[in-house]
Amino acid sequence: MTKKHVALLFGGNSSEHDVSKRSAQNYYQAIEASGKYDITVFAIAQNGYFLDPESSKRVLALEDEQPIVDAFMAKVDTKDPLARISALREAGDFDIFFPVVHGNLGEDGTLQGLFRLLNKPFVGAPLRGHAVSFDKAMTKELLTVNNIRNTNYVVLDEKTAQDWTWDKVVATFGDVVFVKAANQGSSVGISRATTAEEFAAALDDSFQYDYKVLVEQAVKGPRELEVGVIGNDEPLVSEIGAHAVPNQGDGDGWYDYNNKFVDNSAVEFEIPAKLPEAVTQEVKDMALKAYKVLNLRGEARMDFLLDENDVPYLGEPNTLPGFTNMSLFKRLWDYSDIDNVALVEKMIAYGFEEFEKNAKLSYQFVTLGEEKIGKFN
């Protein structure tokens, strides 16, 4: 049987560039272990250029990236309007894209738009699903209007932020809030504020990453939960995972970028999370409902906060969750009796399934005849 040809994309120009490399390593190993696919890898450098497959293999192997990029760029005609993606030609034809680009480009819908232009199947959510879910403000608005419980919040820009003094924040949300850049992932551009000075610094930090910032009410005594979801019209939900960092119960600690990807030796994980049966079911139901409301496909991770009274709040979706050795998404499926190989086979199958479904939609247009313009008085 002829093997399907998978184009695995990783890297990108976001702050999660290095995380993407490690996720891609695990996906590559799982795809290769299945024995069903040929794989070509494309690294997207931090300058936004797709590297050729040979250079990309070296980047995936974690060689020093900058010399590889410099050598590649020396051969590129940057005046070519398609120079950034010209390396795709070198792979010949392939059957499906498998993006592992976290943050910008991969999770904001950019790459998915490219895949649609090329009329190729791809793994994961469509452009709309990524774009809406990547914008925390739009996500919360959709969750709220669909009665999916989430934390109280306000959306600010640099002008409206001037009206929000610390006293106003405390009166509205209490004396502990989180400040988040609307379009970033993996705890980048996110700060916890408990004083006027911390709040001002948090706004400055978040506005580095976006022109739109969320201020969210903190959940008291939180437990952080994560749920994996895979599939298209009939998605599957994983076991629920819980994690706690030192001092989290007192509100001083939280699951930040360092805990996620650099050093999680102090983090306590629990899979499956020990929760009352009713809470377990509610969290899974909320995850599935949000997955459908946000028009997600393929895979996603839903992050929750559980307050001191066991009330769950949906924090945010992650439409292209990390798949590093530290990533909880990867572990959740192990505990759900779906190993890495079976998981990638399902994800690839979902990509083909969604492409074939969308190919049946009609995009025919009506040919216009001679224009007959009315009279203007």
Image (cartoon, rainbow, N blue to C red):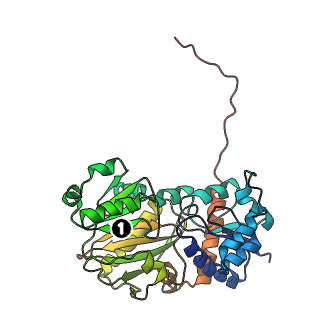
Asked whether residue 217 is in view, the answer is: no
Q: Residue furthest top?
A: 377
Seen at 35% across and 63% down, the residue is 202
Up the image or down, 47 lies above or below 26; here it is above
Q: Residue 17's spot in the image, x, y percent?
A: 57, 70
Q: Which of the 4 quarters of the picture holds residue 112?
A: bottom right
Q: Nearer the viewer, residue 333 or 268?
A: 268
Seen at 32% across and 82% down, the residue is 275
Q: Which of the 4 quarters of the picture holds residue 122?
A: bottom right
Up the image or down, 146 lies above or below 27; here it is above
Residue behind mark 1: 191
Q: Residue 329's spot in the image, x, y percent?
A: 49, 78
Task: Tell me the amino acid under the disc marked 1.
Answer: Ser
Other-residue count near label 1 (Cα within 10 Å), few / some / many at <14 / 14–19 / ≥20? many
Q: Quadrant of the N terminus?
A: bottom right
Q: Nearer the viewer, residue 121 or 16?
A: 16
Q: Residue 359's spot in the image, x, y percent?
A: 67, 55
Q: Which of the 4 quarters of the picture holds residue 36?
A: bottom right
Is residue 295 rendered to the left or right of residue 305? right
Q: Residue 309's spot in the image, x, y percent?
A: 23, 75
Asked whether residue 26 is in view, the answer is: yes
Seen at 42% across and 80% down, the residue is 259
Up the image or down, 76 lies above or below 368; here it is below
* Labels in figure, total: 1
Q: Nearer the viewer, residue 121 or 163?
A: 163
User: What secondary structure is marked by label 1?
Assistant: strand
